[in-house]
Image: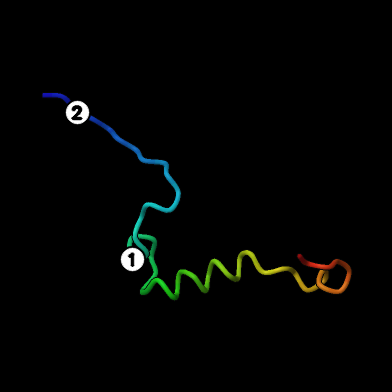
């Protein structure tokens, strides 16, 4: 008998529920928080 360990390290292939979110919208909200420009930089730099 052969035991195979397979690990997939591809980002974005897991559904939102496997990642611990109740909906795709909740996942998108958390992603938005992560990529939001920090307030101390908002007034110093122009965002394109």
The reply to whether callout 2 and callout 1 are in contact (CB within 8 Å) is no
Mark 1 residue crowding within 10 angstroms, few (<14) / some (14–19) / many (20+): few
Q: Within 10 Å of the Cα at label 2, are there few (<14), some (14-19), or many (20+) other Cα atoms?
A: few
Which callout, 2 or 1, points at the residue further toward the start of the chain?
2
Percent across and percent down for residue 38 are 75, 69
Question: How far across and how far down the image is residue 17, in percent?
Answer: 33, 66
User: 30 left or right of 12?
Assistant: right
Residue positioned most to the left: 1
- How far is the residue under mark 2 from the one under mark 1? 28 Å
**Residue at 53% in and 70% down:** 30
Picture colour scheme = rainbow
The quadrant the N terminus occupies is top left
Where is 5 relative to 35, above or below? above
Give me the residue at 37% from left, 64% from top: 16
Which residue ends up furthest to the right in the rendered image?
44
Q: Residue at x 78, y 67 (%)?
A: 47
Q: Which residue is mark 1?
A: 17
Under tag 2, what secondary structure?
loop
* Residue 27: image location, x then y, percent: 45, 69
Q: Residue furthest front?
A: 48
Picture quarter with the C terminus: bottom right
Q: Residue at x 37, y 74 (%)?
A: 23
The reply, left or right, for residue 4 in relation to residue 37 is left
Number of marks in the rendered image: 2
Residue 2 point in image, percent of width and height: 16, 24
Which residue occupies the foreground of this view, 42 or 46?
Answer: 46
Nearest the viewer among 1 and 29 is 29
Q: Nearer the viewer, mark 2 or mark 1?
A: 1
Farthest-out residue, top: 1
Q: Which mark is residue 40?
A: none
Splitting the image into 4 quarters, where does residue 25 fall? Answer: bottom left
In this figure, which residue is indicated by the disc labeled 2?
3
């Amino acid at each position: 008998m052969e035991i195979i360990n397979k690990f997939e390290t591809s980002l974005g292939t897991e559904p939102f529920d496997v990642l611990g979110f109740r909906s795709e919208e909740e996942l998108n909200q958390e992603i938005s928080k992560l990529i939001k420009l920090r307030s101390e930089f908002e007034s110093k730099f122009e965002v394109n």
